[in-house]
């Protein structure tokens, strides 16, 4: 067996990520607030489950967290009975949650105070990427800590890079979300235009996806968009959380993000339509609702 690892948070991303670690012969202990999910994970993968955070991380060389937001991470990691109160000295905490860069920096200081390392490591690729072991992982932290965890992270990543000091991974993820927001809105507008112009939208994509307009979003989302199917993928509520981090950071560093601000307001309208949990490609639904 390789290193002992703990994985906290078995959501749509964490569940398969922890599974890949198990399949790569790491000794995995999982923890999830819903014990039913942990039990189900154990029917599919080799490992153990813990009933408390402290129990999960006690023997781990690397602790992975994949949670919801800053408050969730603070509750699991920094509060009494949390990760940092139970990790053994020399262990490294890898946070895959998309958070603020400020939280990453706070956790690094707190981890160092108990003799542990910290790497912020948000991911891109969605549920499909997690299930296929094809995530992109953007890391921030010390080189020595990155070198210690990179092999384990490669269990579910097609690309992993150290972007700089702690917080750099989160900043890179903000760039990722800024770029996606504009691309998805452009795709939504293009599909809406094609339909209203009387074109076969499927044929349009077949043609333009072979040229400069091609994108991951186009190739992986246009069919479900045209079918008005949004019960999958990365939820609007999580995209808005991520864009809020980017907009806040943009104000702090003087970046102009007019398109990001606009698309964020469009996502707010999607939420008002009842699409809080819809995939981010549901920007087309907003345009079509406006045409009714």
Image: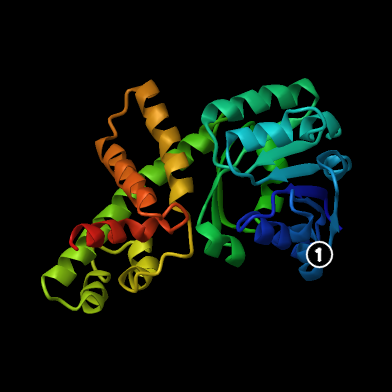
Q: Is residue 267 left or right of residue 131?
A: left
Q: Is residue 125 left or right of residue 87?
A: left
Of the pair 50 and 275, the residue shown nearer to us: 275
**Colour pattern:** rainbow
Q: Is residue 187 above or below residue 250?
A: below
- Residue plotted at (26% across, 60% down): 188
Percent x, y for residue 64? 71, 45
Secondary structure under the numbered disc 1 in the rendered image: helix
Q: Is residue 53 above or below residue 2?
A: above
- Residue plotted at (80% across, 27% down): 80
Does residue 109 appear in the picture of this structure?
Answer: yes
Does residue 143 appear in the picture of this structure?
Answer: no
Percent x, y for residue 149? 71, 44
Of the pair 208 and 103, the residue shown nearer to us: 103
Residue bearing mark 1: 42
The image quadrant where one finds the N terminus is bottom right
Q: Quadrant of residue 223?
A: bottom left
- Residue plotted at (80% across, 49% down): 5
Q: Is residue 185 left or right of residue 153?
A: left
Q: Quadrant of residue 186?
A: bottom left
Percent x, y for residue 284? 29, 60
Q: How many marks?
A: 1
Residues packed near mark 1 inside 10 Å, few (<14), some (14 to 19) or many (20 plus): some
Q: Is residue 159 above or below residue 117?
A: below
């Amino acid at each position: 067996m390789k290193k002992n690892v703990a994985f906290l948070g078995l959501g749509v991303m964490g569940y398969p990520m922890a599974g890949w670690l198990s399949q790569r012969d790491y000794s995995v202990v999982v923890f999830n607030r819903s014990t039913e999910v942990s039990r189900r994970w154990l029917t599919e993968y080799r490992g153990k489950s813990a009933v408390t955070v402290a129990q999960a991380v006690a023997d781990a060389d690397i602790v992975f967290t994949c949670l919801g937001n800053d408050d969730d991470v603070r509750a699991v990691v920094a509060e009494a009975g949390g990760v940092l109160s139970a990790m053994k000295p020399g262990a490294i905490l890898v946070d895959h949650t998309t958070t603020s860069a400020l939280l990453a920096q706070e956790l690094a200081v707190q981890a160092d105070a108990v003799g542990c390392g910290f790497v912020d490591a948000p991911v891109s690729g969605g549920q499909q990427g997690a299930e296929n072991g094809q995530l992109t992982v953007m890391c921030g932290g010390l080189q020595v800590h990155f070198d210690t965890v990179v092999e384990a992270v490669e269990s579910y990543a097609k690309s992993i890079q150290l972007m700089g000091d702690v917080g750099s991974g989160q900043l890179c993820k903000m760039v990722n979300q800024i770029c996606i927001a504009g691309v998805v809105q452009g795709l939504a507008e293009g599909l809406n235009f094609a339909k209203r112009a009387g074109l076969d939208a499927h044929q349009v994509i077949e043609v333009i996806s072979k040229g400069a307009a091609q994108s991951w979003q186009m190739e992986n989302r246009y069919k479900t968009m045209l079918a008005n199917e949004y019960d999958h993928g990365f939820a609007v509520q999580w995209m808005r959380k991520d864009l809020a981090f980017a907009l806040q950071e943009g104000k702090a560093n003087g970046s102009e993000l007019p398109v990001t601000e606009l698309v964020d307001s469009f996502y707010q309208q999607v939420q008002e339509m009842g699409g809080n949990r819809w995939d981010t490609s549901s920007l087309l639904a907003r345009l079509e609702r406006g045409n009714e």
